[in-house]
Image (cartoon, rainbow, N blue to C red):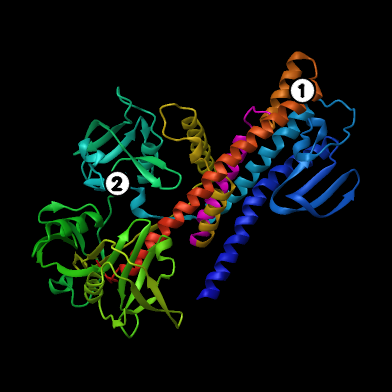
Amino acid sequence: MEWDAWLLNLWAIFWMLTFFGGSIFIHEFGHFLMAKKRKLYVPTFSIGFGPKIFSWKRGETVYCISLFPLGGYVALPQMGEVPILEGSSTAPTRTLSFMDKFLVAVMGAVFNILFAFIIATILWVVGLSVPEQDRSTEIGYIVPEWSDEFGITQPSPALQAGLQVGDKILAIDDQLIQCFSDIEKYIILGTHRGTQGHAQSRITFERNRQTHHTVLRPLKVQTNLLTNDFVRFSGIIAPKQDLTIERIESGSSAEKIGLQPGDTIVAIDDQPLYSFLGLRAYLNEKKPESVVLGIQRNGELLKLACEPLKVAQQKAWLQMGEKNKLLEFYVDEQNKDTCIKILTSQGEFFVPFTEDAIVRSCNGIRINNLNDLYALLESFRGKNLMFELVHNGKSQLVSLPVTDLNLQLHDMQYTYRLGILFQQKMILMHPTPWKQFAQSIQSTLETFSRLVNKNSDIKVQHLMGAPGIMRLLHRFSTDDFRRLLWFIVLLNINLAILNLFPIPVLDGGHILFACIEKISGKALPGRFISTLQTVFVILFWGLMLYVTVFDLRRWQGDLQMESEQKRLEKLAIPIQLN
């Protein structure tokens, strides 16, 4: 299994470097080919950045392979030198025409577009798999309330705005909604605020075939503890879905009342159901001894009484201490012999306690369950503790100095289930290259417009640099290669648009200089262009450093969230069906 994971990771890294580096390289290759065609002086063409690994010279150009395979660069001193990037060289004195400068500058973006078109065409042919329910714009579930990281609970913005499950969202802030993901997208990208400065979104929706309007005031929800990222949140978390049964657990409540694969659950206790989350929330909130299910079968509506089964969902665990000084224990029943293990350890005080180490005894007393451990720790409160731990087959004694840390035993958690597995229908979309281009251009321009809008909550820190892009490429490479192709189209369209911005050091800056020279009839001083570009290179590097720092911090924060997810997985009791 570890060998398979290693190969999968190697596969992902290969495609990550190929597509990320290739997208930048193809851009520079476009400049290079046009520069050669227009007979410009090209002293260097590099695959990769940084120190040269090896190089060769052909004609006037030195071709080199550099250490970092994340793109490349082409030196064009006649277009204005940037010594800080490309070093100094003696450029020929031949004056470049407007078309020389324009074509060389624009060809990088053109090659990105051509590359994106090739990838988009491949994706058009192979198709992109998406859940059928994501094509819906009807609300399937709204969280009733939301608790932040401090435990403060606030009511759901969608419910406060009068929205209900089953409502069809037509538009948000005058933006037409095409699919469920558009709802979250346009809430997050919202720029409207009320008279007191609070964020708000104008919602147009359909209910009972009538169009209504309301104002939703989204919450700001933290998405990463380390970067302090916040996004707007509506409380709408699931689309309407078809609750058609695929499989029924043997001996379950559903089997006892005669439910069959192919049946569709449409209501519970005469309340319409729009999603699995709605069904689960109803059962766990009401905790009913019996419910009446509305079943659609072969065009007929049936009503069947059912007794939900109460089953264990999460194991009990014992907590010693609090955040940043925390030790937790849980029962692992996966082995033949049930044993107590370390769930998590946080803080220097508990460094010797390795996660998943088996706890054999405490102060020489054998431990069999969490209740015994809790009673034992209470009896030795204020005294030294000596634990016998076993990790990777090796036994060791770990001492804990006198401590009076808080102890809390968390009980096992239960949930209510019917014993049903619902169908997860997938559809294969074949978006044309033109549609993919339109969506990518729209997404890029929407993001940049929010960055410069003072009422937006999208800030520079939310931008994604090289580390963030490579993380996405890595994830898509392992999850769904077709999703990787979709992202490459977006990335190349993004690179093309970004590079055409009229900013010195970008291709658009070169085009701007060429246009100024064309209109004025005078060449701009070479030193002026070189100095201006050097200044903007430094500013650009500063921006990239700022974004990269947030990328890396966000990565750390995501790893913490993944660690918490793994913790919950250890506590989870597998439930075969819903």
Q: Secondary structure at mark 1?
A: helix
Q: Secondary structure at mark 2?
A: loop
Residue 337, numbered label: none
Type of secondary structure dominating the magenta stretch: helix
Residue 182, quarter of the rendered image:
top left
Q: Is residue 445 above or below residue 10?
A: above
Between 424 and 379, the one lying in front of the other is 379
Location of mark 2 (residue): 150
Instruction: Give the side of residue 343 with respect to residue 59, left or right.
Output: left
Residue type at the position of mark 1? Phe
Residue 174, quarter of the rendered image:
top left
- Res. 566 in view: no
Residues in magenta, as a range: 479-504
Between 498 and 48, the one lying in front of the other is 48
Q: Is residue 491 rendered magenta in the image?
A: yes
**Residue 479 horizontal/vertical position (percent):** 48, 61
**Residue 203 horizontal/vertical position (percent):** 29, 33
**Residue 378 horizontal/vertical position (percent):** 23, 69
Between discs 2 and 1, the one toward the N terminus: 2
**Residue 554 horizontal/vertical position (percent):** 48, 49
Residue type at the position of mark 2? Phe
Location of mark 1 (residue): 528
Q: Is residue 10 above or below residue 198?
A: below
